[in-house]
Image (spheres, rainbow, N blue to C red):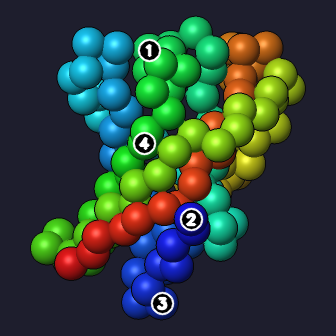
């Protein structure tokens, strides 16, 4: 069930803000990390590798939560909750390059770990905002 982000909060997803992505570890504790992301109006996408804990967390439990604080007003935020829908191979690191450019590095090149790169696709099921 996809949820529609309120119009006043869509810019937090559309602008190159950093998000805090929460996943659930196999021991049921929470792991939260800053992440680059891209929102296409329906899903949120992240670049990641298959060699890190966050990837293993999502294989164990596909629940995800992304929190974005408005850089102009730290009392305003958007939290999006959803699930891992798809893992798309990105062995050339092209999505990483695209996100690097989105976040201000015009000369971004593929990272050394490109062969292990994937795109994590998150559903937008529920949101909270203030």
Single out the mark in the foreground, 1 or 4.
4
Question: On screen, 29 above or below 128?
Answer: above
Nearest to the observer: residue 60 or residue 38: 60
Q: Earlier in the sequence, mark 1 or mark 2?
A: 2
Disc 1 from disc 4: Cα separation: 14 Å
Q: Which mark is residue 53?
A: 1
Dots 3, 2 in contact, CB < 8 A = no
- Quarter of the rendering occupied by the N terminus: bottom right
Q: Residue at x 63, y 59 (%)?
A: 43
Q: Position of residue 78 (x, y in %)?
A: 32, 68
Q: Position of residue 93 (x, y in %)?
A: 78, 30
Residue to which mark 3 is pinned: 7
Nearest to the observer: residue 42 or residue 74: 42
Q: Earlier in the sequence, mark 1 or mark 4?
A: 1
Left or right for 76, reference 32: left
Q: Residue at x 71, y 23 (%)?
A: 117
Q: Residue at x 40, y 55 (%)?
A: 81
Q: Which mark is residue 64?
A: 4
Nearest to the observer: residue 74 or residue 104: 74
Question: On screen, 33 above or below 92?
Answer: below
Residue to which mark 2 is pinned: 1
Q: Earlier in the sequence, mark 3 or mark 2?
A: 2
Dots 1, 2 in contact, CB < 8 A = no
SS at mark 3 in the image = helix
- Disc 3 packing (10 Å; few <14; some 14–19; many ≥20): few
């Amino acid at each position: 069930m996809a949820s529609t982000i309120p119009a006043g909060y869509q810019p937090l997803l559309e602008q190159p803000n950093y998000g805090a992505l929460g996943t659930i570890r196999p021991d049921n504790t929470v792991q939260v990390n800053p992440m680059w992301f891209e929102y296409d109006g329906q899903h949120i996408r992240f670049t990641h590798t298959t060699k890190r804990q966050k990837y293993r967390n999502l294989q164990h439990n596909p629940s995800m939560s992304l929190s974005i604080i408005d850089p102009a007003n730290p009392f305003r935020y958007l939290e999006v909750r959803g699930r891992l829908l798809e893992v798309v191979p990105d062995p050339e690191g092209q999505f990483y390059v695209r996100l690097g450019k989105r976040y201000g590095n015009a000369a971004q090149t593929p990272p050394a770990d490109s062969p292990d790169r994937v795109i994590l696709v998150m559903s937008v099921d529920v949101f909270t905002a203030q």
